[in-house]
Image: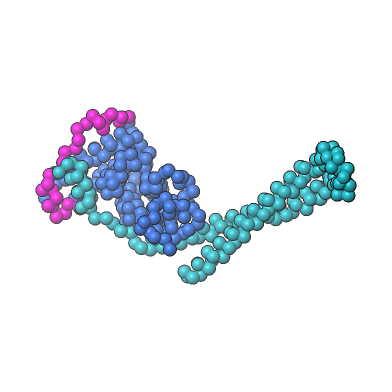
């Protein structure tokens, strides 16, 4: 027998100790509690983000409308609707004017807020639903 | 329903990452006994080893997102177990820190050392007929450094390669090989010198 094999045989002769079954239960209970805390924190963060974005949306939207109004964007847009023939004949000038008068930064900000808000809303809804599932399973286990 | 036998560790980890506690329970059941016996090599008291085992599995769950694709789960988990056991010993001051410190386990540059020494001799066959062999082995193991004991357990009980052990202990492979060889020599000496 090779030396390696004799030592393998030697160590195989050592009985393997078995931990108490309660250890697994205790670990899973700790994991479960930590899971709930983790979900609560994440749900809190995303809910705060939803509130923040909704609160920021009103002034950002107001700012976008004011800028569009002041730059004459609405007038140019309504001109395009009412007098489409002249718009088509000088479409390059029209397109340039529309782009120049459009409140691009403000619109970008509003869109960004809408996207972040929608994402956070989805996430917080999913966290709250997970939280209620976790609580239900806790009650079932108890 | 998860088929616990056929599913790989990596697949289970993916499920744990997506919040599946059942997958973690399966993973834990798979390694519970191995980790417990490994921790017993550091923390020699059963009840304390159970506490450290709990902490190990909880830490592994907590940091499961740090486990990246391409990593091997077993060495990763054993590394957490070792660190948790060493932290526990430090806190308890059961053993002086210097003993646990890798310095005393032999951190000198041992490159080439493992290759330069002759292989350990085989154990005499009559040794295996002893009634109290496992107890004698346990006594012989108890005088070894915890990391050296862990090397033997990982290699012979867990069938881990020296590469995996080196990864677990965060030591060069040659150091691990020389710890392994020295420990075997000590064990062989003490078993042979015990009268049956």
Closer-to-camera residue (B42/B30): B30
The percent position of residue A93, horizontal first and vertical second, equals 84, 37
Q: Quadrant of residue B161?
A: top left
Q: Seen in the image, is B146 located left or right of residue A115?
A: left
Q: Seen in the image, is A140 located left or right of residue A101?
A: left
- Residue occupying the point 28% across, 46% down: B159
Q: Seen in the image, is B122 located left or right of residue B178?
A: left
Tell me the colour chain B is drawn in.
Answer: blue
Q: Quadrant of the N terminus of chain B?
A: bottom left
Does residue B139 sit above or below A18 in this rendering? above
The answer to whether residue A44 is visible is no
Tell me the colour chain A is drawn in.
Answer: cyan
Q: Is residue B25 magenta?
A: no
The percent position of residue B59, horizontal first and vertical second, equals 45, 51
Q: Is residue B116 magenta?
A: yes
- Residue occupying the point 43% across, 54% down: B12
The percent position of residue B63, horizontal first and vertical second, equals 47, 49
Number of labelled discs? 0
The answer to whether residue A84 is visible is yes
Closer-to-camera residue (A31/A94): A94
Question: What span is in magenta?
Answer: B109-134
Q: Quadrant of residue B174?
A: top left
The percent position of residue A31, horizontal first and vertical second, equals 47, 58
Structure colour scheme: by chain
- Residue occupying the point 67% across, 54% down: A118
Does residue A134 sit above or below A46 in this rendering? below
């Amino acid at each position: 027998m090779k030396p390696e094999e004799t030592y393998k045989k030697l160590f195989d002769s050592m009985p393997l100790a078995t931990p108490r079954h309660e250890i697994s239960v205790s670990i899973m209970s700790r994991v479960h509690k930590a899971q709930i805390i983790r979900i609560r924190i994440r749900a809190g963060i995303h809910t705060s983000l939803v509130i923040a974005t909704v609160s920021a949306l009103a002034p950002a939207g107001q700012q976008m409308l004011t800028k569009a109004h002041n730059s004459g964007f609405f007038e140019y847009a309504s001109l395009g609707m009412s007098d489409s023939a002249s718009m088509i004949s000088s479409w390059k000038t029209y397109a340039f004017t529309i782009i120049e008068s459009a409140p691009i930064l403000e619109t970008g900000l509003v869109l960004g807020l809408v996207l972040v808000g929608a994402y956070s809303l989805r996430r917080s809804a999913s966290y709250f639903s997970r939280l209620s599932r976790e609580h239900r399973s806790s009650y079932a286990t108890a | 329903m998860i088929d616990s036998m056929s599913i790989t560790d990596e697949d289970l980890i993916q499920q744990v990452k997506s919040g599946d506690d059942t997958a973690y329970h399966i993973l834990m059941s798979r390694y519970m006994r191995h980790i417990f016996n490994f921790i017993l090599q550091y923390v020699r008291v059963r009840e304390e080893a159970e506490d450290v085992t709990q902490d190990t599995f909880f830490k592994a769950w907590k940091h499961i997102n740090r486990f990246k694709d391409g990593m091997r789960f077993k060495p990763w988990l054993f590394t957490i177990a070792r660190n948790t056991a060493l932290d526990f010993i430090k806190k308890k001051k059961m053993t002086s820190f210097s003993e646990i410190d890798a310095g005393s386990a032999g951190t000198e540059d041992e490159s080439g050392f493992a290759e330069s020494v002759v292989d350990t001799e085989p154990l005499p066959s009559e040794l295996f007929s002893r009634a109290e062999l496992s107890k004698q082995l346990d006594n012989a193991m108890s005088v070894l450094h915890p990391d050296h004991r862990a090397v033997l357990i990982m290699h012979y009980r867990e069938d881990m390669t020296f590469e995996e052990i080196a990864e677990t202990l965060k030591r060069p492979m040659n150091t691990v090989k020389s710890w392994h060889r020295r420990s075997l020599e000590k064990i062989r000496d003490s078993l042979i010198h015990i009268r049956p």
